[in-house]
Amino acid sequence: MRHHIGEQTIRFESRPAITAVASVVGPKEGEGPLGQLFDKVEPDMMAGTQSWEKAESDFARQGIDLAVKRAGLEIKDIQYILAGDLLNQSIGSTFGVRSFERPFFGLFGACSTIGEALALGAMLVDGECADNVAISASSHFCAAERTFRFPLELGVQRPLTSSWTVTGDGCMVISSEGEGPGITAATAGKIIDMGIRDANNMGAAMAPAAADVLVRHFQDLKITPDYYDAIATGDLGRYGLEILKRLMEERELPLGDRATDCGVMIFDNETQDTHAGGSGPACSAVTFASYFYPRLKEGVIRRMLFIPTGALMNSMTSQQGESIPAIAHAIAIESQ
Amino acid sequence: MESSEKAKKQYQDMVEIYSPKSKIATDCLRAFLCGGAVCAFGQFLSNTYLSYTGSKETAGALTAVTLIFLTVLFTGLGVFDKFGKLAGAGSFVPITGFANAMSSPAIEFKREGLVMGIGAKMFTVAGPVIVYGCLASMVVGLFYYFLK
């Protein structure tokens, strides 16, 4: 355990670099505050296919294709693809990746998938098992609604604490050589369940998992939140972020203004009626790729802690009255 | 993170403070006005049909058919869910709510085919209404039979 520090953290001495990123999103994301920053905004929710599931797979295919090209590589230069999504048996990823014919590891961490992928991808590269790894996380609003909730055209009201699944795919290429912000450390999260049962309040279910991994990260590396210029959680939403800030204050590690949440950034609730904010594996992946990555690359943000968060339930466990287990992974990324 | 029952309870109490609540009074008023408007429109249809046909029974059937047709049409056009968001429980006025509950999954699961898609999934939302509606009418029927 040469690289293992403290209880749950790995320090990557070789600083695997994120050499390229890509973000492909749907129309609503394109109309949001980050609209101009995405690489591709698909105007059609079906993306020219016959189903939402196919559209999601196509987003994943496009994202990986674009990121690999941007890294100056060909798909055959990628030793492993790590990808995940929200659909049953991760078909959003597998159907998208199949045409690449590259070794593939399917991941499931719900909305925390890109954090899991960053940690594992950095381990593969730092451990000299791969030179180049492509990671991707996707989701699709319509496909997720029918998997987890109601038909789109059913006239029901959404609770104020509910979130809006982001349509799109965020992809990154992690390489042993090449220019780009480096992954310096990763703290893998534990499953935390504080007994929240409301599947329409996932921010509240996930905030304790984020707090737990943050405390562990700071303790393991013997640093405090002010080490980072930016601390961004995945999809806690407006209310979840407030809860997290309060939890961290109680633990005497206040996050202050450097804390934000990708779910809060990606939509404008006033004009887009998204309630608590964005969610889904693509939420943190595309927000990182479009907003944070260029800033890390330019050095506007020098050190960032990225904490994708995931709620690990399905519609059956919710119907059976189970509480919601949650997870979060903390990934430290620093400019060159 | 401490996860004793006491810590969980404390956390859940804190979540209550941070989570916004629906505005019950406004929601009730909107449901009343919108649901009432649908009913008033139904009454208008019923009166109109009655004046043409002279039969209360025919007028009632025609009113139901018209309301169902309009709901399914607006569901297909993607308008009914917006009305549902505004009206809340007001959009559940039996016949329109039911028609929307049947037609929205039919549209949604079109891709899975006529049998396992539309045929099977059409009842995912409305099915329980049918089951418990039948059960309730049986219970009421039994009471009526013995107590008459």
Image (cartoon, rainbow, N blue to C red):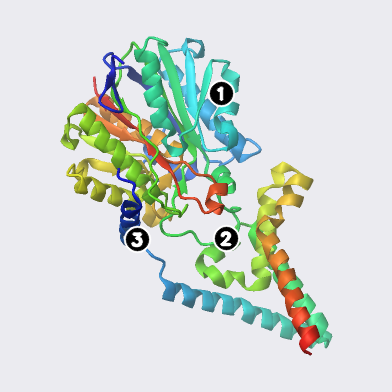
| Secondary-structure class at tag 2 | helix
Residue where numbered disc 1 is placed: A97
- Name the amino acid, label 3: Glu
- The residue carrying pointer 1 sits among few (fewer than 14), some (14 to 19) or many (20 or more) residues within 10 Å by Cα, namely many
- Name the amino acid, label 1: Val
Q: Nearer the viewer, mark 1 or mark 3?
A: 3
Residue, far bottom: B148
- Name the amino acid, label 2: Asp
Q: Residue at x 70, y 42 (%)?
A: B111
Residue where numbered disc 2 is placed: B81
Q: Is residue A174 shown left or right of residue A147?
A: left
Q: Are marks 3 and 2 in contact (CB under 8 Å)?
A: no
Q: Is residue B92 shown left or right of residue A2?
A: right
Query: Which x, y percent locates residue A211?
Result: 29, 42
Query: Which x, y percent locates residue A116?
Result: 41, 29
Name the mark on residue B16: 3
